[in-house]
Image (cartoon, coloured by chain):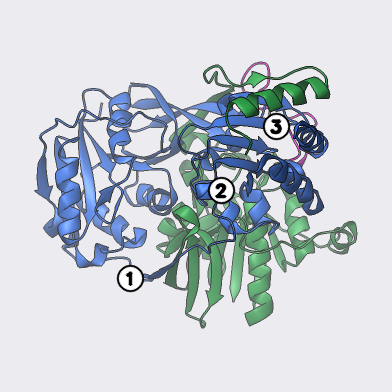
Chain colours: A blue, B green
Amino acid sequence: MPEQIFAYILHKNGNVDDTAAELIHAANAISPEASVVAVVAGSGDELQAVCDEMAKTYAEVWKIDSDALVYINAEVLRGLLVRVLPKNPVVLVPHEHFGMDLSPGLSVKLDAAYLPDVVAFEGLEGGLLKAVREEYSGMVSTHVTCDIREGAVITIRPGAFQPDESRDAGGQVLDKTDEAVDGGIPGGNRRYLEIVEAETGDVDITKSDVLVSVGRGIEDEDNLEIVFDLAKSMGADVSCSRPIVDAKWLEKARQVGTSGQTVKPKVYLACGISGSFQHMGGIKGAPFIVAINKNAKAPIFQVADVGVVADIVEFLPDLADAIGDTK
Amino acid sequence: MEILVCVKRVPDSSENEIEVNPSGTDIERDDLVYSVNEWDNYAVEEAIQIRDKVGGSVTVVSIGDEDAEEVIRREMAMGADNGIHLSDESFEGSDGRGFATILKAVVDQGNYDLILTGAQADDGAGQVGGMLAALLDYPYASLVNLIDVLDGKRIKVGREIAGGHQEMNEIDLPCVLSIQTGINEPRYVGIRGIRKVASIDIPIKGAGDLGVGTETIGAAAAKVKRQDYFVPELGEGAEMLEGSTDEIVEKLIELLKAKGGFK
């Protein structure tokens, strides 16, 4: 049983990421007895504010403060973490773009196991941690065991664990900066330059009340017309999932998902979208979700309110015609 | 620029319904259509485009049984110059670290400036590129959606981060990058292209050829092991509308009206 579990805290502009309060519950699910230490890296007053905030949730907060961490480069942070973490640590990191950048290499440098994108834990026995992961974009799940006796870096799917909202930990903040930077700043062979903001399109789907969203099931660029026809009949806007943008059929500004836009419509019509967690992660505010997909086993049917098993290329024109007739 | 691209043969989940077999030991593999992992295909296309711009060569490497050869050949038909097929019984049951260890040996035997992997494959782990970089002590960037060669020593890469934004970095070569879909438009490979490379010899290398100690790979070295496959019961799921198309459409319109789905 690990005595301590470390939780890496994401934050931006002084605001703590939603995953910060989820990781403590993930740690509790691994081992209720372990003390959970929040590790927060950054710089200056913003960092201090995040640490103080985290001390409400975590009994112990480790702070790493450096000018080299104003914008956190995973290559830099990895080297610093290796210096401050104890032998054989269990480290939890959110499974998103930064965690994916940091974690596989961190596990190698710590000579620890790597267990990615966990959605649930099912017990720890004799150093073997049992966890649930998904494969094939969520179409099937697996139980995996991970030997954590020599440490483990575990990435946790955002939203998979409930956030801890008690906020009464009264924790203490320990400054680990000296230990972390002793030996200089590592990772100089990858240098952060800038953030290029996403292009804005002619439609702002983040403001739409009704979205007709199209995915791979549309099969052909020419078929997009039927999606726009349906949206027009409903007075809705058209959004899409990642494969449509990858194919350059629609602009990036229409993409819903963690790597695209976060939308909060009242009604979301998912057409030919399988429903990967990256896509669903971009839908907030609990809209009424209608899923139309020819694959009855598509994960979207598990999260939708209403489902129709149909080929969208045939079904959407019928729906658009019928809506037209009601007007 | 000498470029190595790591590719994997996987069930094509856009062509197949992935189901669990009756005993839960595996997915149902009968009648599956296999192809090259989608992310890897973007990586190969990117490598070919870089080579065509600045010169050099593209080598495609894949770990797997005899069937892995077909994806190597497919990527050579796209335009990759060389293929390496890694196959050995001792590779079986490796976890991500094991596969990264095998690939490190390939890198050590070559003279590569740039090593590309797909950002993830069928198991959604997204691990091998980052591990490989750490084993090699090379810099790494994940989820790369732009590569700009600056000179023989440095490249500029864009990473896809949240909200459609892009994080720009400068990286020294040699380095490892994991490639995100959408970075380019992979070219189509036709039967004729495949035929052209049908007779090219693709060397097969095992643990001995690579000098990989079998204690560092395979099931015995794996700290992470898959126990079973299953389909989770997630809440109640959707209310499925059934009946004739007309009946379904009518019911759906009623529901959409009630929920404010019309203007």
Residue positioned 55% across, 47% down in the render: A256
Q: Which residues are magenta?
A: B14-35
Looking at the rendered structure, whether the residues under marks 2 and 1 are on a common chain is answered as: no
Between residues A38 and B259, which one lies in front from this camera angle?
B259
Q: Nearer the viewer, mark 1 or mark 3?
A: 3
Q: Which mark is residue B120?
A: 2
| Residue A292: % across, % down | 70, 32
Q: Is residue A258 above or below residue A164?
A: below
Image quarter in which the N terminus of chain A is found:
top left
Magenta stretch containing residue B29, yes or no?
yes
Q: Earlier in the sequence, mark 1 or mark 3?
A: 1
Label 2 resides on the chain identified as B
What amino acid does circle 1 point to?
Answer: Gly
Residue positioned 86% across, 60% down in the render: B199
Question: Residue B103 occupies which quadrant of the picture?
Answer: bottom right
Residue bearing the label numbered 1: A188
Kindly report the distance in space between the C-alpha atoms of the residues bearing marks 2 and 1.
26 Å
Magenta stretch containing residue B27, yes or no?
yes
Q: Secondary structure at mark 3?
A: strand
**Badge 3: how crowded within 10 Å, few (<14), some, or many (20+)?**
many
Q: Are marks 1 and 3 in contact (CB under 8 Å)?
A: no
What amino acid does circle 2 point to?
Answer: Gln
In the drawing, does residue A187 fall left or right of residue A293? left
Residue positioned 44% across, 51% down in the render: A97
Q: Is residue B209 above or below residue A174?
A: below
Q: Which mark is residue A292?
A: 3
Label 3 resides on the chain identified as A
Counting labels gives 3
